[in-house]
Image: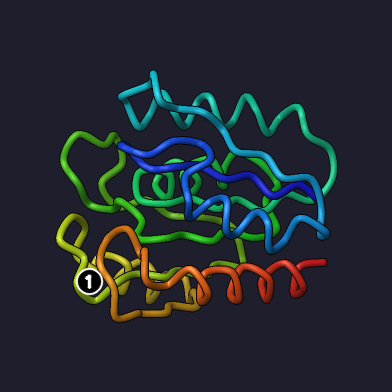
């Protein structure tokens, strides 16, 4: 199994959130974290992720935070993805090619903060409802910095479900 992380617009491939989750699930498969730091366009990031995961064989779980959530969602339609975990996904924002993305993945978990000041949590509610996704709203902001334990727990549960 391959677990592929996609960071947000102003983050990096091994930020504290990704490090915490990766450490927690390292025994479940190969961990990958794509570096998008020099790519500003979310849709160019999608192309990079699709090209990357096309080289992988076996089951793939995508984990995306903010812009990385958008990137992972769009890419999930291009490849066989068994799990999609979205952290405060950047849906319905200007400058993105697809305003209201969809996913063909059947195992989707979304975690979003009630106090997110970047991406309204209502966008995740709308996506979750349309996809019958598992939506978890937490008492946190956009970075979900107070929810690392919950992120690790939910990612572990998802991976166990798709194994």
Whole-percent x, y for residue 123 in the image: 25, 65
Whole-percent x, y for residue 89 in the image: 36, 56
Count all numbered tags in the image, as a single digit: 1
Q: Secondary structure at mark 1?
A: helix
Q: Residue at x 60, y 59 (%)?
A: 21
Whole-percent x, y for residue 75 in the image: 53, 40
Q: Residue at x 31, y 41 (%)?
A: 98
Q: In the figure, is residue 77 to the left or right of 115?
A: right
Camera-nearest residue between 20 and 8: 20
Q: In the figure, is residue 99 to the left or right of 54?
A: left
The residue tagged 1 is 122
Q: In the figure, is residue 114 to the left or right of 144?
A: left
The picture quadrant where one finds residue 125 is bottom left
Q: Residue at x 36, y 64 (%)?
A: 145
Mark 1 Cα-neighbour bin, 10 Å: few <14, some 14–19, many ≥20: few
Question: Compared to 86, does 70 lie above or below?
Answer: above
Tell me how the rendering is colored: rainbow
Whole-percent x, y for residue 37 in the image: 40, 25
Q: Residue at x 70, y 47 (%)?
A: 80
View extreme (top): residue: 38
Q: In the figure, is residue 101 to the left or right of 2?
A: left
Question: Compared to 120, does 68 lie above or below?
Answer: above
State the quadrant of the C terminus: bottom right
Camera-nearest residue between 101 and 134: 134
């Amino acid at each position: 199994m391959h677990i592929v992380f996609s960071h947000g617009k102003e983050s990096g491939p091994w930020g504290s959130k990704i490090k915490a989750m990766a450490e927690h699930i390292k025994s479940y498969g190969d961990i990958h974290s794509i570096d998008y730091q020099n790519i500003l366009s979310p849709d160019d990031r999608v192309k990079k992720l699709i090209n990357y995961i096309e080289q992988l064989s076996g089951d793939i779980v995508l984990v995306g935070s903010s812009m990385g959530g958008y990137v992972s969602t769009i890419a999930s339609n291009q490849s066989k993805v068994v799990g999609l975990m979205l952290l405060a996904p950047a849906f319905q924002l200007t400058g993105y090619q697809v305003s209201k993305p969809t996913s063909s993945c059947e195992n989707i978990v979304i975690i979003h903060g009630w106090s997110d000041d970047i991406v309204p949590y209502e966008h995740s509610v709308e996506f979750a409802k349309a996809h019958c996704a598992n939506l978890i709203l937490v008492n946190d902001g956009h970075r979900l910095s107070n929810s690392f334990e919950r992120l690790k727990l939910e990612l572990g549960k998802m991976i166990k479900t798709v194994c």
